Amino acid sequence: MRKGWTTGACAAAAAAAAYRALQTGSFEQTVTIRLPRGETPTFALKTQDLGDGFARVGIVKDAGDDPDVTHGLEIIAEVRPGPPGGVSFAAGEGVGTVTLMGLPLPPGEPAINPGPRAQITAALQTVEQELGENVEIPDVKVTISIPGGLEASQKTMNARLGIIGGLSVLGTTGIVVPFSCSSWIHSIQRGVDVARAQGFKHVLAATGRTSEQAANSELSLPDEALIDMGDFAGGLLKYVRSHPIERLTIAGGFAKLTKLAQGSMDLHSARSSVDFERLSELLAHVGADETPVQAARDANTALRVLELASDAPGDQAEALANLVARQAREVALATLAGGTEVQVWVYDRGGKRIGEAS
């Protein structure tokens, strides 16, 4: 299936093209940027608007064969001189604003995630270097707009997460991988087959790249022993039950492993959700008083509950993460029905291990 580009990659390319026009006084027909993993896609410019002290560029989002709600929308970046201190960001039409805690950005910030912000900053710095200017990050204000984004956001979970007014600008790698349940589960099964065929006794299954890299920095397993489980915990565990391996490490973020601990076999946000009542009971179990426990019941994300645990006297975050890990391990063992040794490692967004059970 054909891959596509994230909103973050499109925003970075649009910002780079706009900044170049602001500096040179004219637009080029295309713009090429370098993504975090080294890919160098080229984008055609749609909107081209150069005015007094600003430049604006739009790029049409191509999500490939992924059923992405932003596919076909125009991602517009406006660049103008900003206050000292580097690149600042603002939300234009169709881009949401964060209103609740528990997300990677504090309330009041435009919903342009840290990954895209870093990509935009890097793209602007590259233009600065190519034009022979200094290599410092330029002092500019970047406003991202997505016409039609407010309507498209109604098909997402943004409102429930406290992102109001439009879409989020997302993407850590810049690339959209087409999402296919059957093909992903097929890949998991083939991964288990390959590991067994190689005679590996230990396999690491991770929900994402951050947890995989962090866990394997300790385990040092060969690539063939690494399973990109993604959201399909059930697809992995049910296959390992009939094709056993000696030892399985499950690694993932707090939110996804909370879902596994609560019995969900599909960890995708569209098909399962965190039971905040149950999670608040775990928070009470590790010693939190009624104030953070009540706040946990009303939380919008599992990350917010983890923050409440961290802020509580005595810092119950580690105890909470360990309890989630233990319950996730119990669910995995029950699904496997014996024959495999299981350990579960829980990670935060930065790749730090915060909970474990074995």
Image (spheres, rainbow, N blue to C red):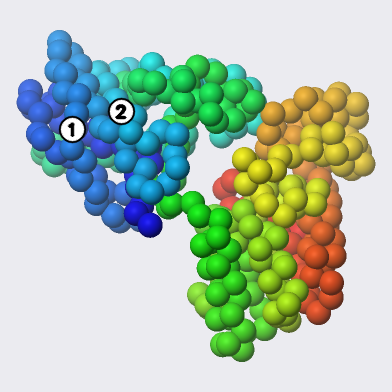
Query: Looking at the rendering, which quadrant does residue 255 occupy?
Result: top right
Determine the residue located farthest toward the front in the rendered image: 182
Q: Which residue is mark 1?
A: 45
Give the residue type at disc 1.
Leu
Q: Position of residue 112 (x, y in %)?
A: 44, 30
Give the residue type at disc 2.
Glu
Q: Position of residue 90 (x, y in %)?
A: 39, 19
Q: Would residue 116 appear left or right of 107 to someone viewing this image?
A: left
Query: Looking at the rendering, which quadrant does residue 337 occupy?
Result: bottom right
- At 81% across and 48% down in the image, what residue appears? 262
Camera-side residue of 156 and 30: 156
- If the image is split into quadrants, where does the C terminus sit? bottom right
Pointers 1 and 2 in contact (CB under 8 A)? no
Residue 306 visible, this angle: no
| Above or below, comparing residue 294 to residue 208 in the picture | above
Query: Looking at the rendering, which quadrant does residue 47 occupy?
Result: top left
- Per the rendering, the mark at residue 161 is none
